[in-house]
Image (tube, rainbow, N blue to C red):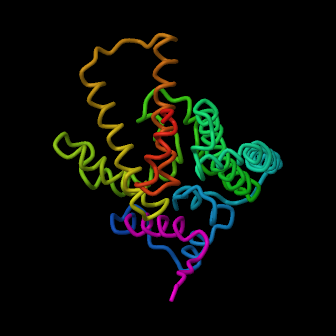
Amino acid sequence: MLRLLVVPLGLSFATFRAIDLLVKRYLDTVPPLSFSQIMFYGFFPPVQLIGPIIEWNEISKQDARPTPADLLDGVFRVSIGFVKVFVIAGLLEENAQIFTNPNNWETGILWLKLVGYSWYFYLNFAGYSDIAIGSANIFGFKLKDNFRYPYFQPNIQAFWASWHMSLTRWAQRNVFLPAGGYRAHTQYFALFLTMMAIALWHNISLSMLIFGMYHFTAQVIYRTYSKHTIKRAPTVLTRICSTALTYIVVLLSLPLLFHEPGKVFVFYAALAGQ
C-alpha cells in the first residue's frame, strides 16, 4: 500500500531556525527566551514558508514600529518580488519542459532553454525572498538580503556566498566552523559537510547528494587553482571569462535537480549533441 508522508509547509525553514537557536543557546550567545519569544521566533509569518532563514538576533532588537519609509520600501520590495515570480519567472517557466524529454530539442535550442530555466529558477527563488523581506519591512522588521547577483560572480565560492545567503550563513555557523573549516587539515572535510547540508536541505535524495558533491568538487578545484596562481588585479576580460565559466559550472548542475542519476546522463548527452 502506498503511504504518503505529510509534513507541514515550511518545515525545513523552521527546523534550521530551531537548530540555530539551540546551538546559540548551548554556546550562550543568546539569553534564555520566554515562551512567547520562542513562539514569536518560531512563527514569524513573512518568512515562515519561503525564507530567508532568519536569526533571532535579526529581529530581537527591532521594535516593529514601521515608519512611512518602511511601508514604502516594503511595498516596493514586495512589488519587485511579484514581478520576478509572477511575470518574468512565469514567462520562463515553460523552459522546464526540456527536462521531460531532452531529445525532442535541437542542441542549440536545448542550451538556450537550459539558460532560460536557470533564470526562472533564480528569479522564482529570489522573488519569493523579496516578497518575504518586503513583507517583514512592512511590519517594521529589516531582514538581511538573501541573494546578491549570484550569476554575476567570478568564481564558484563567490557564487555560494551570494546564493541563498541565509542558508549559506547557517551552514557556515553550524557546520563549516564546528567541523574545523578554518584549519588547514580539516577545511575540505568541513567544506564537504557544508555542501552536503546545503544540498540535502533542498531534498533528501541521491540526486541531491551528487549535486552537493558536484559543487564541493568545483570549490576544491577553484581553491586549488587559486592557491597556485599569482594574484593579479583582474582585467575586464578575465572578469568576464571567469564569470561566464562560473555560470556554466552552475548551469550544468541544474539537471541534477530534476533527474535521477541514471537519467541525467541522457540529458547531458543531448546537450553534447548525442
Q: Is residue 132 above or below residue 35?
A: above
- Determine whether, in the image, residue 94 is placed left or right of residue 34: right
- Determine whether, in the image, residue 68 is placed left or right of residue 14: right
Quick check: can you spot residue 78?
no
The reply to whether the magenta stretch includes residue 8 is yes
Quick check: can you spot residue 254?
yes
Q: Is residue 255 above or below residue 237?
A: below
Q: Residue furthest left?
A: 185
Q: Nearer the viewer, residue 196 or 45?
A: 196
Counting from the top left corner in percent of width and height, residue 58 is at: 56, 55
Residue 30 falls in which quadrant of the image?
A: bottom left
Q: Is residue 223 above or below residue 231?
A: below
Q: Nearer the viewer, residue 60 or 258?
A: 258
Counting from the top left corner in percent of width and height, residue 27 is at: 33, 64
Q: Residue at x 51, y 47 (%)?
A: 255
Residue 182 falls in which quadrant of the image?
A: top left
Counting from the top left corner in percent of width and height, residue 212 is at: 38, 50
The reply to whether the magenta stretch includes residue 113 is no
Residue range highlighted in magenta: 1-23
Counting from the top left corner in percent of width and height, residue 257 is at: 50, 53
Q: Residue at x 43, y 65 (%)?
A: 204
Q: Residue at x 63, y 50 (%)?
A: 125
Total marks drawn? 0
